[in-house]
Image (cartoon, grey):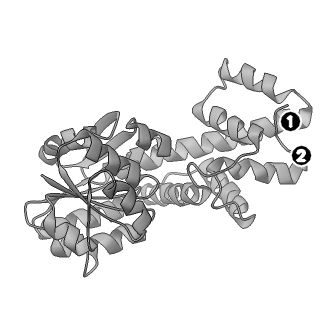
Amino acid sequence: MKIGFIGVGNMGGPMCRNIIRNTNHEVVVFDVNAAAAEACTALGAAMGESVAAVAAACDVVFTSLAMPAVVEAVALGPDGIAAHARPGSTYIDLSTNSPATARKLRAAMAARGVAMLEAPVSGGVTGAEAGTITIMVGGDAATFEAQRPLLASFSGGVVHVGEVGMGSVAKLVNNMLAFCNMAAAAEGLMLGAAAGIDLDKLQQVVMSSSGASWAFRSLAAKAFAGDFKAGFALDLAYKDLRLSQELAEEVGLPGLVAPQVVALLRMARAQGLGASDMSAMIKVYEGIMDRDTRAP
C-alpha cells in the first residue's frame, strides 16, 4: 500500500516516521518546509512534488496541519486532495479541527468516492515521537477497521468514537479539560508563591494528594526551570480552546470556566507569549504579582 503524508512538522513528522519504521508500506511525503520533509525521506520516504501529486498516487493520504483553514485549503482547494485523490482511496485527517469542518470534508470526499476518517491525536510531540499518542477516530466503522492497523503503527491507543465529527468533539473536550486544568494549576502555584511556601515542597504535596494532575506536573516543571520552550504552543492551545467554545455555543452550553481561560490565553498572547509553551500562561500571573515561580 502507498501512504501519503502531508504536513510533517512537529507532530506530523514523528507520526510519519513511525509509519516508515513500523510498516512495510511505501510512504510519500509533502510539506512546504523542505527540511521537515527531508527528515522523513532520510528514513526512506519519497518526496512528493505537491499535494495533488501525493493525493493522486496514494491509497491512503494523511494530513497533519495546524489550523482548520489550512486543512480545508489542502483538502478542498483546486489543487487539493479531493480534486485529485483516486476513487476508493482513503483520506485521514490527524489535525485538531471543528466538527463542522470535519463533516464538510467528509461530504466533499464522499462526492469523489473517497472514504474519510478524522483522527485527531493527543499526547504531544513526546508522545508522537514515542508512538504512544492516543488517536480518537470518527468515521464509518468499516473504514475504521480497515485502517486500524495503520493507525496502530504510530500510536499507543486507537479509539473509534463514532461518526465523522465525534473525533473532533472528543479532542476538543480533552483539550479544554487540559487547558482549564493548567490554568487552575498556574493560579494555584502563584497563590503558593505569593503566600511564601517552598514551591518544591508544595509540588511534593500536590503530586501525592488530590490536587495532582498531568497539567500541574507539566506546568510546575516548566515554571520552576523558567523554560517555556514550546512543546505545545500557547497559540495552538488558544486555537483549540476557541474551537471548543464555538462547539459550546453551537450546543447551547453555558460555559463558566473555559471562557475565563480563553481570556487568560488572550492576555498571554498579548504579552508576546503565543510561540511559547502553553504553560507560559503562568507568566500572566507572574506579571500581575511581580514575582516568579522558580523553585529553589
Which amino acid type corresponds to the residue marked 1 in the rendered image?
A: Ala
According to the picture, the residue beneath numbered tag 2 turns out to be 291
Question: CB atoms at circles 1 and 2 under 8 Å apart?
Answer: yes
- Mark 1 Cα-neighbour bin, 10 Å: few <14, some 14–19, many ≥20: many
Instruction: Using the numbered discs, state the Cα–Cα distance from disc 1 to disc 2 in whole angstroms.
Output: 8 Å
Instruction: Locate the C terminus by quadrant.
Output: top right
According to the picture, the residue beneath numbered tag 1 turns out to be 193
Where disc 1 sits, the SS reads: helix
Q: Position of residue 123 (x, y in %)?
A: 46, 40
Between 157 and 127, the one lying in front of the other is 127
Specify whether 90 is left or right of 218.
left
Q: Residue at x 43, y 58 (%)?
A: 9
Q: Position of residue 12 (x, y in %)?
A: 38, 54
Where is 80 relative to 60, above or below? below
Q: Residue at x 17, y 44 (%)?
A: 24
Where is 226 relative to 61, above or below? above
Between 52 and 239, the one lying in front of the other is 52
Q: Position of residue 148 (x, y in %)?
A: 20, 40
Where is 73 relative to 136, above or below? below
Q: Position of residue 208 (x, y in %)?
A: 66, 17
Which amino acid type corresponds to the residue marked 2 in the rendered image?
A: Arg
Specify whether 146 is left or right of 135.
left
Where is 247 relative to 71, above or below? above
